[in-house]
Amino acid sequence: MDRNTAIKVSNLTHTVTSNTGDLTILKGINMEIKESESVAIVGSSGSGKSTLLGLLAGLDVNTSGDIFLYDQEFSNQSEEERALARGQYVGFVFQSFHLLPSLQAIENVMLPAELKGDIDAREKAESLLEKVGLSHRLTHYPNQLSGGEQQRVAIARAFASNPKVLFADEPTGNLDEENGRLIIKLLFDLNQSQGTTLVMVTHDNELAKMCDRQLVMSAGQLTEKAL
Amino acid sequence: MSFAFRLMFRDIRSGDLLTLLLALVISVSTVTSIGLFIDRLQLSFEKESANLLAADRLIRSDDVIPAEWEKKASNLTLQTAQRTSFTTMMFADNSLQLSQLSAVTDGYPLRGAYLIDDMLFGTGQSSTATPNQGEVWVSSRLASLLNVSLGDQVEVGDLALTVTQFLVRDPGSSASAFAISPRAVMNMADLAATNVIIPGSRVRYSLLLAGDRASLDEYEDWITPQLNEGQRWRTPTQRGERIGDTIGRAESFLLLAGTLAVVMSGVAMALASSRFVKRHLMQVAILKTLGATPKLLGRLFFLQLFVLFVAGAVVGLGIGWGIQEIIASLLSGLMSTALPEPSIGRLWLGAATGLVSMVAFCLPLMSHLIKISPLSVLQPNAKIEFNSFAIYLIGFIGMFGLMCLYTNGFLLPSIMTAAILGIALLVASIGWFAFKLGRSLTSGATSGWQIGLASLYRRLVPNLFQLLVFTLIIMLTLILIGVRSNLIADWQQQLPEDAPNHYLFNVQANQIEPINAQTSELGVQASAWYPMVRGRVTEVNNETVQSLYPEERGEPELYERELNLTWSDTLGQGNELVAGDFSAQGLSVEQDAAKEAGLSLGDELTINIGGNLVTLPITSIRTVDWGSMQPNFYLILPKSALEDYPANFVSSLFVSDTEAQSFYRAMAQYPTVSILNVGDILKQIQAIIGQLSKAIQLVLFCILSAGALVLLASVRSTLEERLEEGALLRVLGARSALVRQALLVEFGALGFFSGLIAAIGAETCLFGLQVFVFNAEASFHPLLWILGPAIGVLVITTIGVFASRTVLKVPPMLLLRGL
């Protein structure tokens, strides 16, 4: 694999079993993403974008084909190895934030560093929350925060492990326009300042246009959109 | 490691771990308190029964007890005492009387106490002393027959002894209750000087032992192989004895109650575990996304569960101990004796219940949780498929193992397991049908009724599961209520307050009339008089008993000794014909004795009566209620076979305490008549039964409280879904009354069906328990069929509506955001 390549996918197929029988969501996908690139995956609902993103982040196992994330080959790895790889390379921002409701904002952000055993997890989390403008909300619980604030906490958490690749699944999908803009700015600022690769699933054309590349998912197949 | 603790601390703060901890504490404390309390009751019964034996264990022998037997007991730090009992003539001035004399060593009785009085026919004060050397204590009856008072001298063989007390009760008397002569007790140190025991005398030697159970068991193992034909090892609760039987049944009940507590705890833990795991799905998925490996998560949760178990077990054991102390102190006012301290060793049960239910219910769910892909949880429309059958099967096996361990057998757990499986099937089929019917009747739902019924079918699987839990708890309650009332009614029937407490023996035909006249004047009614002739079975179907049992070993009781024979034209009270014709001119044999001797209708027995041989065929077999306190006989002959032999008569009668003195004085006119007073034993048995009944009601109350807690836990486990639905309904404009009505209907229907199915299950289980566990006759319980649905509707609706009250009060927005 090229030294500058962050992600490489070849012949990726993914099939799930449902009540009505087997359903192939991804059909022979090939792609490559370079380090520090920002890539948007666009497409209609149910086309398989989020599934692809989850597979790229090693959150599930594909049916066939290969996925490389730097030197990690997810397809052949055990859950144990994939989890280690996620901790080392991956940050993830979800559409519905997925903060732990029982933890305060700062504790949510501390989690990745704590998992790695960092002793300065709290300081790191404080500084990240400050960067996303939430230094006054450290001890608030998720249900005490607005949607935009929750997503900012989620972004701070995603960057807490200094990921090489940040995956974002419709990060503005649940937010109003103003909050959406704020989140996008944050994502791109952090992406640039930390040199992170950004892979984002979105319905938002404006947001997609801000990325270096756009990939279109349609009926389980991926094509490059000419800029 | 410190991360694990930090995470746990945060979980505790959020209340998620607390729910599981609470279930664990409830589980452990319920089982502990009931287990310990039952242990104390058992120890207390044993102690009460030990009072009847005057010891914890006793060896009865026809020969002198070897010195090394006592030495071995002392080596095991057991307390010992000896009693030598025999029948002898006692003399005073011009009177003489055959009496039952016991010589006892200092320290006798080891358990219980004498009742003695310095007034003739007094009611007595308790005393644990023994008569001093040179003294004798005589029963009031013996004193009046010998015409002696305190300070007078009586002669036993070559020795004169001074009467210093009137003996009201000898604590060991039940061991030889049917020695019918009036009693006296003297010091063992005087025995040799009397010279009454000569080779060939009929003497019963007893070695009494008391001490801790382990030493007694060790002693039993040592002594048993050395016992010969004429020697017996006796324990207080030996089966076959009336008291042993009563206690045996009470123990079965308590065992059942304890097992049910284990099952309820299991249900509570299963519910709490599944809630705990559901609440942790998201946490695990997010931690995995952030790079937590399955190994790390495994360690994390194992540590959490371990700490939780230790905390839950310690707190639960403490609370359990406290609760049983409270129960015991509440009960102490009702019981005549203080309860013995519980054995610390019994604490294992509570801890084991906690451990097994955590391992059985939590670990499989946890390990499944750790393995699932995070994406399947985090995607917006993710649906988690748990293989609940396999998971609950593990829990089920765990609970079954625990029940087996607890009851020390398979029978009770197997009956209960079969019942639970049957109930699950019944619940699934009835529930599915009823809920579906409810749904089809309510299409286009607009009223609270319709919404309530419709939601039963909409959440079919969780509702069926909840229906099963409700059914099980109500069923267990009904079973306990059924068993309790059966047992208590059975006991009360067995020994009514006015059960005969005296037997009159050796009554001549011409004495019957005057005795009847005198007793009826005193207001005492004698039962029927039975003639008694002694005889011994010598041949069976023309084969001699000696040839059938050449070594005189293992011969049935019917052939072993001389029997009391009687004749009667009618079946006596407590007798029931099971085969043949009682009026036929043949022998009527008691069923158990016939079974032991392998006899059936038509077999011929030859009986030696005063040197004459009488041969008769068996023409009827009957059962006898030995508890009826009426004179009962193994063999009843036709009148024609016995009428020519001199007979004396026997009868039983009830003499109240107030009538006792005049009754004894009246009977003193018939010195040849023997009176056997079993009143003291009866009173003790009745006292024990009274205590058992109270104890059982208290245990029932405890179990019901635990059941209510489990019901509450069960309602809470589906609360979130109901809250969400209620909040949505209110957002859509439904009035509180409509939501309340829907909740009432939903819980009411769940309660009604669970109560109904529970009644079916309880009736079936009671049948099994009565027939196979309590060895009693099966009966129908109409009350359960009313109680079941009533309890179901009332309790579940109350708990359900109470637990869901937030849905009616809190603004819907807050509810939806908080979910």
Image (cartoon, rainbow, N blue to C red):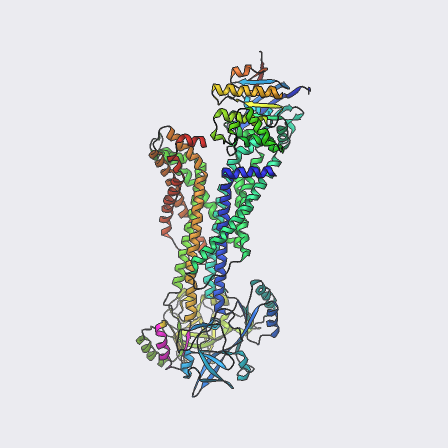
What percent of the width, then of the height, locates residue B312?
Answer: 53, 46
**Camera sees residue A196:** no
- In this rendering, the answer to whether B216 lies above or below A83 is below
What percent of the width, then of the height, locates residue B51?
Answer: 48, 68
**Camera sees residue B70:** yes
- In this rendering, the answer to whether B642 lies above or below B23 is below
- In this rendering, the answer to whether B505 lies above or below B599 is below
**Residue situated in front as seen by the camera: B811 or B98:** B811
**Residue situated in front as seen by the camera: B567 or B141:** B141
Give the quarter of the image for residue B469: top left
The quarter of the rendered structure image containing the C terminus of chain B is top left
What percent of the width, then of the height, locates residue B243?
Answer: 46, 65
The quarter of the rendered structure image containing the N terminus of chain B is top right
Going 41% across and 56% down the picture, which residue do you hit? B697
Q: How many marks?
A: 0
- In this rendering, the answer to whether B471 lies above or below B237 is above
**Residue situated in front as seen by the camera: A38 or B778:** A38
Give the quarter of the image for residue B374: top right
Going 37% across and 65% down the picture, which residue do you hit? B496
Residues rendered magenta in the picture: B658-678
Q: Is residue B445 magenta?
A: no
Residue extending furthest toward the top:
A227
What percent of the width, then of the height, locates residue B267?
Answer: 48, 45
Q: Is residue B670 magenta?
A: yes
**Residue situated in front as seen by the camera: A180 or B678:** A180
Residue extending furthest toward the left:
B521
